[in-house]
Amino acid sequence: MTKHQQLQRRLGVADATAIGLGSMLGAGVFVVFAPAARLAGELLLVAIALAGAVAYCNAVASAQLAAKFPQSGGTYVYGRKQLGEWPGFLAGWGFVTGKSASCAAMALTFGQYVAPGYATPVAVAAVAALTGVNLLGITRTAFLTRILLALVLATLAFVAAASILGPHVADGGTVSGPAGAFPGPAASFWGILPAAGLVFFAFAGYARIATLGEEVKDPARVIPRAILGALAGALVIYLLLGAVLLAHLPVQVLASSTAPLLDAVEQSRLAAGAPFVQAGAAAASLGALLALITGVGRTAMAMARERDLPGPLARLGGHHPVPVAAELAVAAVVVLLLLTTDVLTVVGFSSFGVLLYYAVTNAAAFTLRDRHRHAPRWLNAAGLAGCLVLAFTLPAASALGMAAVMAAGLAGRAVVLTFRRRRLRRLGKR
């Protein structure tokens, strides 16, 4: 790899942590509690804790590997280095395809909160604007992420305060939901695993820190601190929010809500602050979208460097070098999804892809010889098992849909490699 192809190390602990936390407190925090409560019922906090435990295993594995291989690309690079080309490709393909759908969903969520009648054109404009910010350099990305994260944290604090204050006296705090939306307490225990799989999707933001490994100062020290710090902050926030929501709203209402945090405020003494929650959700969507475009672009660049994606995607440009070609390609794919696809049905597939991504992460970390006491091999084994269990207990449509996408990617790579080998043999005979 030549020198001009290298990105610049400009991020410290605070910036890297903000990018990870901004990803984990994206639009998901405003919607994930409802489908998780629908599956786990009053055991919602158990599902959150289980997702957090699996995420901790994955975070430790990611920190181990990122410190050893401080390159852009995250588990795509780690899988190739420790397990071989095919596991690395599996991780990279799952991340790029799944997170591209997530980008479209975040953009559409922003559009629906800001201008419901014009959600798609507003979403396309958001993708274009944030891609422009990313192309200015990683420090601009980190600066905007900090601003958006501050708005989101203020919104979540307001939601918690409204829930703690309790329902509005005039209406008794009741809201109506569709009949039969909640499966009932008997289904709660068996819904913990799929609920944890959904919540895990929200915890996966620390992967963005690892994908920025080539742009972090002193990566052996900064990356582990940023990953574990971001995860710890997100887990505390999700548990606290889950607890206050369960205390404030009947579980049946929480399970049937389409905007649980907004409902919590509207059914409280602080109902006048509902527009503030809508603004916070919009900011969260933008923050998550910004981090997602950044992470997917870096992974696509890393895959292009190894010719697992078209080589031109590895090109860098700009005053502060960024993967211009990969960023623009990601933006184009996201816009295409927004214009042609029902994104909200596609995004469910992403959880399966992300869990496979982290299964490869744990398997790669398990093979490391140099280990710290806080990262024993049994933790990597537990993380691998946890990822596979959560992946294959997701709703069948999500698992089968993403499995088909993964199979198509693997088949495509096999065809390309076969073509390359034949071409090399023909050239060798000349």
Image (tube, grey):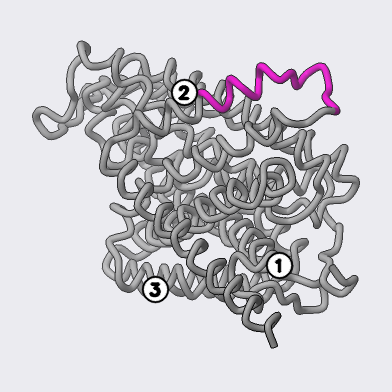
Residue wearing tag 2: 48
Q: Going 18% across and 17% down the picture, which residue do you hit?
A: 184
Closer to the observer: label 1 or label 2?
1
Q: Going 82% across and 71% down the picture, which residue do you hit?
A: 5
Q: Amino acid at mark 1?
A: Arg
Q: Amino acid at mark 3?
A: Leu
Is residue 19 in view from this perspective?
no
Q: Going 41% across and 33% down the picture, which residue do you hit?
A: 391
**Residues under numbered marks 2 and 3 in contact, where contact means CB atoms less than 8 Å apart:** no
Closer to the observer: label 2 or label 3?
3
Residue wearing tag 3: 336
Q: How many marks?
A: 3
Which element carries disc 2, helix, strand or loop? helix
**Residue in the foreground of this view, choosing between 74 and 413:** 413
Q: Going 37% across and 49% down the picture, which residue do you hit?
A: 402
| Circle 2 Cα neighbour tier, 10 Å, few/some/many (<14 / 14–19 / ≥20) | many
Residue wearing tag 1: 305
Identify the magenta region.
370-385
Which element carries disc 3, helix, strand or loop? helix
Residue 249 in picture, x, y percent from top left: 30, 23
Say whether disc 1 or disc 3 marks the residue closer to the N-terminus. 1
Q: What is the CA distance from the residue labelled 2 to the residue labelled 3?
A: 33 Å
Q: Quadrant of the C terminus?
A: bottom right
Q: Is residue 292 above or below residue 151?
A: below
